[in-house]
Amino acid sequence: MTLFDELVAVTDPERVTDRPFDLHLHSADAGLRTGEATVVVFAETTEEVCDVVRLAARHGVPLVARGAGTGLAAGAVPTEGGIVLTLTRMNTISDIDPVNRTAWVGPGVINLDLSRATAPFDLHFAPDPSSQQACTIGGNIANNSGGPHCLSEGSTVNHILAIEMVMADGEVVILGGAAPDPIGLDLRGVVVGSEGTLGIVIRALVKLTPDPPEVRTMLCAFPTVEGAAAAVSGIIAAGVVPAALEMMDQGMLVAVENWLHAGFPTESAAALIAEVHCAPEAADAEVDVIREVAEQEGATEVRVARDEAERALIWKGRKSAFGAIAQTAPNYYLHDTVVPRTRLVETISEMYRIADDADLTMMNVFHAGDGNLHPLIAFDATEPGMADKVHAAADEMVAACVARGGVLSGEHGIGAEKRDLMGTVFTELDLDAQARLKHVFDPDRVLNPRKILPAGSRCFDYGGSPLPEGTWI
Amino acid sequence: MTVSTQVHRPESIDDLALVLRDHSDRERSLAVMGGGTHRWMGYPVATDAVVDTSGLAGVRVFEPDDLTVVVGAGTRIGDLESELAAGGKTAVLPETDHDATVGGVIASGASGYRRARFGPTRDRVLEVTAVTGDGRAIRSGGRVVKNVTGYDLPRLYTGSFGSLGVIESVCFKLWPVPERTVTVTVDDPERVRSEVHRPMAFLDVSGAHRVMLGGTGRAVDAEVSQLGGEVVEGLDWPTRPRHGVRVEVRVPPSHLPTVVSRLNGDYISQIEVGIVETTVETATDVLALRADVEALGGAILVEGGHEVDPWGTPPPTLDLQRRIIAEFDPHRIIEPGRLPGGI
Ligand SMILES: Cc1cc2nc3c(=O)[nH]c(=O)nc-3n(C[C@H](O)[C@H](O)[C@H](O)COP(=O)(O)OP(=O)(O)OC[C@H]3O[C@@H](n4cnc5c(N)ncnc54)[C@H](O)[C@@H]3O)c2cc1C
């Protein structure tokens, strides 16, 4: 039997496809890189996932897990061909426990649907990527995704208590648990963020966060990017960690306003969106601190949303910003890097310089409170040589962040996109340690091969080792 | 632990690497001594020698406005927290174990009572530099508050009890110290759940309920007047029960009332977290409760060296854990056998 026939035998003829259109659709994510899927399978049960993993191993073909395909680092792109295993149909939410504030969730559940399902209990799932209307919990776990409200609540990993996972040999394991600090090594913690390279997540026990009694959303306009960035540091230095603290630069404000007409301050060089979540009295106090710091740093306008509608509009502008770019250019390349918060101003200036020098249009909308930058280069891919130019500028921007004590990615992941840059932040020994972890979980490199780690990460792949003989097992 | 004759006190990561490589080559085992405050946890191990981490102490980089600090593993957490407090920050480390070291807290995965609001320590471990059992100095994570660059080894190190290497330094994410903090002893714990949005800590201390609140002066005033009860300025942490065999129960929080109803001694129960610290006269006293707690998906830790298994039933992923450890400590020389399952 061919691989295709065997996949049909363990699933359902309706849920295995190699039609060119389907393959094309499942060979890319929301980023720029593409691959070539051999076959696509839609799994519905644990047994099916186990069988598909075993078939991949037996046939020696790569297996790439896929959620909604909104990833931006080519994590779900089958760069080496093989089986794309889509988990969107495993979308059950069960055991919502309002006392312990937990729920068991299938990997295919859409992020926003989870918070909708738990809303009757005044609970929500804190990580809120801007793509939350589409992206899945499986993808959130695999990428350790963030979002505006991760400033005070932390990224996905802080909200995952246990993971049920299919290992590379087709066995099912449960990592972590409902009680705090499960004994033994924290394998749950290292599987979150592993981008489908250590196992296939088939269910997760998520931690739910109580809805705040009071929410205040503010929009502060600044005449300079420096002023806005200084306000970010100032607010935190004043002892307030808002629920969210986001920045949009002028390019982004104009793009969003042209489309949304929500009164974003298009005359300003930058705007901050700040949100506080607390008890009513505490909210007033924090709003005052933020207003004071913003005004001190030269804010020309500080607006507090008067009602839920105004609040929703501000967030719509923020979360749909990438969509609004379509009016500027047909394509965009969105990057994700982090620098220490105090280096924001100089890093952003350097990014504008890099874009200017390359004659590229760049704008920014990002998680300023975390120092998590999202420079976005808008371009037209049909222009000859454009793609190379964009990639070169983007690499230069990443290097500018690393030079300032930053890292390659804060929330989108490394995937295929940045694996070759890993050597700019880690030594050979550091990468070897990570490769050893991968080796233990997936010795035959079936699960999403050639992602995260650059080729030759295991030291003995180099044919020599920097340590005396005998130190290696 | 039996008294070992040889004590190594490395003063740099290179020193530490030499000690480890040498011991690995000769397959001689090592214990790691920080403050010794977590020695009660896990199987007791007899080793050929000891690594004393006090030579790896001190704050290396404190960036208050970035909310990060890089600190040597041998630093006492009491010293670290006072240095941070001078800059208006906290690493939210365990509040009453001043003599514990940074390395010890991370290796044992210990958290403070304020995890009710700020999450467990592992959520704030941004970067770990460690030397593996066979002497490789490796760094993972990064010095920024949000990072997905590579596998999250810092989390794996948190709670690893030395099995992946000796921790040399750590970068923590910090939180600002609130303008005002108070401790309120409340008569009706139900009111805390309805009136207070996310307290810093919420404890049941042998039947008396204490809640710790923090924030701007105005905000704290408002919460206190809603709540009622007896108010003390500052954070008034309870003293851990001392007499007898040390025990820690971990359960999904909804089961705490059942757990504490079955205890005889004094206890500190972390409401909404699910951890109870207590002591028992003889270790075997916990066996009946342990069976029930494990059935709920929890665990009971018992001080090592008594007639009861210190961890209880090991996790089902023991083989996987053993294979990971083999990649980091191939001759299994650092505190061998201390972890659940005796690995
Ligand atoms: C407009 C837009 C805005 C975005 N905003 C944000 C943001 O604010 N914050 C943020 O962090 N990200 C953001 N993203 C990126 C992306 O949405 C997230 O990374 C998201 O979590 C991916 O989920 P997905 O279901 O689409 O996963 P996919 O793209 O399908 O897959 C992502 C990775 O997860 C793996 N994977 C998927 N399911 C599983 C599983 N069950 N088991 C194991 N591995 C699995 C894949 O192999 C791949 O490596 C944005 C993307 C877009 C297009």
Image (tube, coloured by chain):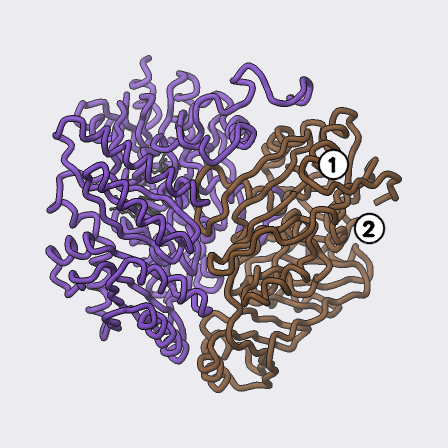
Chain colours: A purple, B brown
Residue to which mark 1 is pinned? B336
Secondary element at image label 1: loop
Can residue A67 be spotted in the picture?
Answer: yes
Q: Is residue A124 above or below residue A404?
A: below
Q: Which disc is residue B306 wearing?
A: 2
Q: Earlier in the sequence, mark 1 or mark 2?
A: 2
Local secondary structure at mark 2: loop
> Does residue A184 lie above or below A418 as drawn?
below
Q: Residue at x 74, y 39 (%)?
A: B335
Q: Where, by quadrant of the figure, is residue A249 drawn?
A: bottom left
Q: Is residue A43 visible?
A: no
Q: Chain for mark 1?
A: B
Q: Quadrant of the C terminus of chain B?
A: top right
Label 2 within 8 A of ligand 1 by Cβ: no
Question: Callout 1: few (<14), some (14-19), or many (20+) C-alpha neighbours within 10 Å?
Answer: many
| Camera-nearest residue between A209 and B314 | A209
Q: Outermost residue, top direction?
A: A1
**Residues at marks 1 and 2 touching, judged by CB atoms closer than 8 Å:** no
